[in-house]
Image (spheres, rainbow, N blue to C red):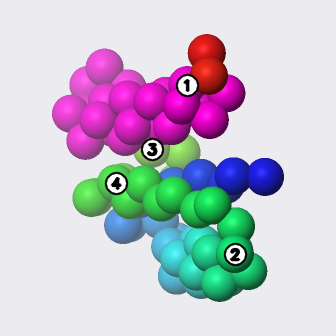
Amino acid sequence: PPTLVSWGTYEVLAGEDEEFAARVKDAGIDTTTVVVPGGQHSYVYGAGRIPEVDSAIAQIGAWVRDRTKI
C-alpha cells in the first residue's frame, strides 16, 4: 500500500527512518516522507504549540485524505 514515513531530525532513529523510506521507495511502493526539522521522538505531542509540528500534521492529513479519498 502507499506508505508515509515521518520523523523528526532529532529523532534517535532518524537514520533508520530514512533508510526504511528509501527501501520502501526502491521496492516501487508509492512512498512519501515528512521530515520535521528539530522534531524529536513523538513530535506530534507538540501539536498546537510548535508550528513545524502543525505543518507536518497538516501534510500527513492531506496525504491520508488524498489516498483514501475522504
When the figure is inspected, residue 70 is found, relative to residue 62, above or below; the finding is: above
Instruction: Look at the image and say whether residue 58 sits in the magenta stretch.
Output: yes
State if disc 3 and disc 4 touch (CB < 8 Å): yes
- Three-letter amino acid code at the position of disc 2: Gly
Left or right: residue 59 versus residue 65 is: left
Q: Which circle, 2 or 3, is nearer the viewer?
A: 2
Q: Residues within 10 Å of mark 2 (few under 14, many from 20)?
A: few
Q: Residues within 10 Å of mark 4 (few under 14, many from 20)?
A: many
Mark 3: which amino acid?
A: Tyr
N-term-proximal mark, 4 vs 2: 2
The residue under the point 53% across, 76% down is: 18
Q: How busy is the neighbourhood of tag 1: few (under 14 within 10 Å), some, or many (20 plus)?
A: few
Q: Earlier in the sequence, mark 1 or mark 4?
A: 4
The residue indicated by pointer 1 is: 65
* Tag shown at residue 16: none
Can you see residue 3? yes
Q: Residue furthest top?
A: 70
Q: Earlier in the sequence, mark 3 or mark 1?
A: 3
Classify residue 22 as left or right of residue 55. right
Q: Residue 36 shows which numbered tag?
A: 4
Mark found first going from the N terminus, 2 or 3: 2
Is 11 left, or right, of 24 in this rendering? left
Amino acid type at circle 4 is: Val
- Circles 1 and 4, Cβ within 8 Å, touching? The answer is no
Magenta part of the protein: which range?
46-68
- Marks 2/3 in contact by CB < 8 Å: the verdict is no
Circle 3 is placed at which residue position? Answer: 43
Q: Indicate whether 55 appears above or below 2.
A: above
Report how far apart the C-alphas of labels 2 and 3 lie in the structure: 28 Å
Residue 16 horizontal/vertical position (percent): 61, 79
Q: Measuring 26% from the left and 25% from the top, which residue is drawn there?
A: 49
Name the amino acid, label 1: Arg
